[in-house]
């Protein structure tokens, strides 16, 4: 086959363009610090990078859920701690007022304090976290307790509020008020016990006051059990958060290995490409040097 000048020119321009594209490729990698700038750069690598990005996104969302769940439980724990303090104070007052020698006016003072503590217990039963009632199951937008729950009918929702903290893993964050304050109508319910304590003080019933002591202690035990449950869930969340942090770092490292540019390698490749491109220009300049002026000399 006869090689013409036109064929030589086309071939040289094709090779020159390839060398120029190769140089542009490494310049782009150094400028963006990414070795994957478009799917055609490495289809398999791009697929892996997208998968790692998705895993990182999921892990970040699970971590945020764990933080929200932990905040909810910390708030519940603080409510239970205050409730414990109130019940302990009520127990102290019951012991003081349960003596036969306590003057009547002193019992009236105790009655006033017990009334205030009863109202505070109701307020704690209606506690809200981020505008959600924490003791009313899934009906978090509805106030669980009336103003006088010892003498007013109510019924709490027992639904569970779950937070997803992993693929197919959830943790219940809410605590039903019944397990803390007791159900309506139960004689050993906390509101009922405090109300009976108030009635005993009002009627100056020493035996009734003394019986409140044991009932308050039983209520205190229920609150302690609920608080222990919250503590166990918080420990679980701490372990989960630690695992998610490790997973996120692992996925970010894998993503970096696939996406990021190896700077030393890219610089070396760019220098080589520049050298090859310059050699191509020199070679072409020598081959196509003859021009019309060269023929006229």
Image (cartoon, helix red, strand yellow):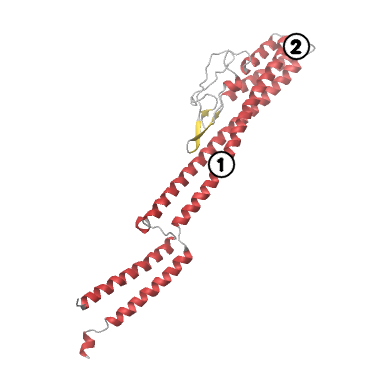
Q: Which residue is mark 1?
A: 241
Number of the front mark, 2 or 1:
1
Relative to 135, is 275 above or below? below
Camera-side residue: 192 or 170?
170
Tag 1's secondary structure? helix
Question: Split into 4 quadrants, where in the image is the N terminus?
Answer: bottom left
109 left or right, relative to 15: right
Q: Is any part of residue 104 visible from this angle? A: yes
Whole-percent x and y of residue 219?
65, 20
Q: Quadrant of residue 173?
A: top right
**Residue 186 rendering spot, x and y as whole percentages:** 60, 13
Is residue 113 at least partly visible in the picture?
Answer: no
Instruction: Identify the residue position indicated by label 2 in the image.
Output: 104
Asked if residue 3 lies left or right of residue 255, the reply is: left
Q: Position of residue 230 (x, y in %)?
A: 60, 30
User: Closest to the observer: 33 or 154?
Assistant: 33
Residue at 68% across / 14% down in the picture?
197
Name the disc covering residue 98, or none.
Answer: none
Quadrant in the picture for residue 278: bottom left
Please determine whether, in this image, residue 204 is positioned above or below residue 281: above
Relative depth, front residue between 244 and 145: 244
Q: Where's the C terminus, which quadrant?
A: bottom left
Q: CA distance from mark 2 to mark 1?
A: 56 Å
């Amino acid at each position: 086959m006869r090689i013409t000048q036109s064929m030589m020119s086309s071939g040289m321009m094709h090779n020159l363009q390839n060398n120029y594209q190769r140089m542009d490729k490494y310049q782009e990698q150094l400028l963006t610090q990414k070795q994957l700038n478009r799917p055609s750069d490495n289809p398999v690598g791009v697929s892996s990078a997208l998968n790692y990005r998705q895993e990182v996104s999921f892990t970040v969302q699970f971590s945020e859920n764990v933080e929200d769940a932990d905040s909810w439980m910390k708030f519940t724990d603080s409510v239970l701690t205050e409730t414990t303090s109130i019940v302990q104070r009520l127990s102290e007052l019951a012991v003081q007022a349960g003596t036969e020698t306590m003057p009547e006016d002193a019992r009236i003072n105790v009655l006033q304090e017990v009334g205030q503590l009863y109202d505070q217990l109701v307020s704690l039963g209606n506690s809200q976290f981020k505008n959600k009632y924490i003791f009313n199951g899934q009906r978090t937008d509805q106030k669980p307790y009336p103003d006088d729950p010892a003498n007013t009918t109510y019924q709490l929702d027992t639904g569970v509020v779950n937070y997803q903290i992993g693929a197919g893993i959830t943790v219940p964050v809410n605590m039903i008020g019944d397990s803390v304050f007791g159900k309506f109508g139960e004689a050993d319910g906390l509101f009922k016990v405090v109300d009976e304590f108030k009635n005993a003080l009002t009627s100056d019933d020493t035996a009734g006051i003394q019986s409140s002591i044991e009932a308050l202690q039983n209520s205190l035990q229920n609150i302690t059990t609920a608080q222990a449950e919250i503590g166990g869930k918080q420990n679980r969340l701490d372990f989960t958060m630690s695992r998610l942090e490790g997973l996120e770092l692992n996925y970010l490292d894998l993503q970096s290995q696939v996406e990021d540019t190896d700077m030393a390698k890219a610089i070396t490749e760019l220098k080589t490409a520049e050298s090859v491109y310059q050699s191509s220009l020199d070679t072409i300049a020598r081959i196509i040097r003859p021009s019309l002026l060269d023929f006229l000399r």
